[in-house]
Image (cartoon, helix red, strand yellow):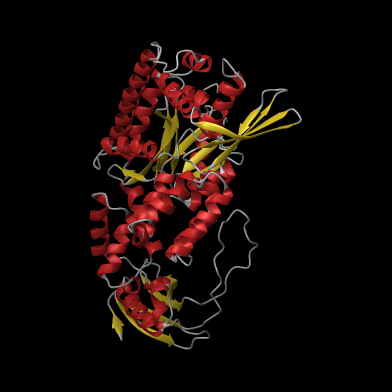
Amino acid sequence: MIFVSEEDAYNTYNTYAITKGFGVRRGTKRYLRNGDMNRCVFHCSNEGYSSTRALNEERKRERLAYRCGCLARIRFKIENGIWEIIEFNDLHNHPFVQENQRHFVSSARHIPEVNKSISSSLVDVGVKPKMAFRYLSGEARGIANLGYTETDFNNYMQKRRQTMLSAGDAKTLIDYFKNLQNEDTRFFYTFQLDNDGRMCNFLWRDGVSKLHFDCFGDVIIFDTTYHTNRYNMICAPFVGVNNHWKNIFFGCAFMTDESTSLFVWVFKSFLDSMGGKAPKTIFTDQAYAIGLAIEMVFPSTVHRLCGWHIEKNAKENIPHLFKQVGFKEKYFNKLLWDCESEIEFELTWKNMVDEWECGENTWLQRLYNLREKWCPAFSRCTFSADIKSTQRSESTNRIFNEMGCKMMSLTEFVNHYERKLVEMRNGETEDDYKNRGKPKILITDCGILNHAANIYTNTIFFRFQEEMLNSISEEVVNFSIEGASRVYTLQRSEDKRTHIVQFDSSNHQTVCSCHKFETLGWLCCHILRVFNTDLRFHSIPMEFVLSR
């Protein structure tokens, strides 16, 4: 049997190998003095032995050893462009790969050009790579029929993004960053290069963002759900909350993938840009790689999962339950937003599992294992700035959807982002201006409310005043004195829940079982009931006024 090219010879032998159940690896080649190849060998992929080097502690995953010294091979002689078989050894010393697993063999995995074209077209119009892979596997009637794995597909898409990130666009962006830095000496930017010297990931923030972070950087949202521009890169903004309870941007990163190593680089770069100051709390989506990176870069930061993302994921992963009347309203929303104690959470979860018979659902099991990161009952002492609210995440997403243009260059997008920053900051200036006017106080003879009107922004004051109005409905159902502490048990007539307020008369230290002050930053109706009615306070103790 003769062949007319190396690829012809390789493809024929590889097709035979896959049919039988083994992989192929290209071996040594010999050349004549004039540079023409005259000998070539293809081995069974189990030829030779794996390296016995010491494990590298830096590597996250060591490869499994499959090579066992198999001598099966085919050798060719090449003369005048004709490939002729001169040796064929078909004796293997290992079991063959089963038929239903042969699509995992390395030499069998190849993405056809037509699939590359289809997937590229889908991604370019906004389809996420994961959904594009699902579409292609569906067209092939199963992953086993595709001829490649999802890892191969993701590697191809990442390489495509990096290749598309043209040197011209990258240079223009760097020049743009340099111009911004000339105008703003506190402007910060950094980027990564791939193995070919091309810029593949970058992060930036301006000087005002640094000032904002110094004031309001106690809690941030890091959102990686938005894909944008012609390269389909991940746009990941760092978002905070100012004293008007509005979203502000601390910076933004563009990423080519969602690996732990890349998240580590992004977080370290952000930390450096903020002078080493880490947030107290960070909210993210439900990505395992992000969690690992946070543990490495922000070890003292509380990691929370954004309820908005969990609700979106629930619609995708348990649609058969989520659409049912009673499941979401009675159980899921309560678990996500309203449980005030761990006991209440566990009881609600048990009742949900029993009523809907969903204890074996793997997605819900994983969600339960992460409960300390998303259920408010497990984070009552963690400041959140109301980031658990769906509206806050939706507003950020809406901003980027308004900005989004799939055909924007990197520089165009950054420029668009900067213009959006100007709009947001103009709104903040307007809020500051409106804050000169004193808000309407509904209980004019209340000293605490008058004090609050003088120290809070109007937005925070109106929320505080709502708590004060709610305090009127709170009744003390039990009272006791334990040393220097006064213990109040409060309850509303229409609510079965009770709340306990402990007040230390020696230092005015006060804690409520609802922990609203710890999570939101202003006093709850339960403490206000005690301060205003029982203790006759005329102002808010300054330890309950956050300096933000």
Give the answer, above or below, for where 497 lies relative to 362: above
- List x then y, in percent, for residue 399: 31, 35
Residue situated in front as seen by the camera: 169 or 501: 501
Which residue appears farthest toward the right when viewing the image? 483
Residue 403 left/right relative to 105: left
Work out whether residue 124 can be spotted: yes
Residue situated in front as seen by the camera: 303 or 118: 303
**Res. 420 image quadrant:** top left
Q: Residue at x 37, y 73 (%)?
A: 108
Residue 420 left/right relative to 236: left
Q: Residue at x 61, y 42 (%)?
A: 299
- List x then y, in percent, for residue 516: 53, 34
Count of labels in the image: 0
Residue situated in front as seen by the camera: 257 or 65: 257
Residue 107 left/right relative to 450: left
Residue 82 left/right relative to 194: left
- List x then y, in percent, for residue 438: 41, 12
Give the answer, above or below, for where 449 lies relative to 513: above
Work out whether residue 218 can be spotted: no
Instruction: Report the quarter where the N terminus lies.
Output: bottom left
Residue situated in front as seen by the camera: 218 or 154: 218
- List x then y, in percent, for residue 186: 46, 21
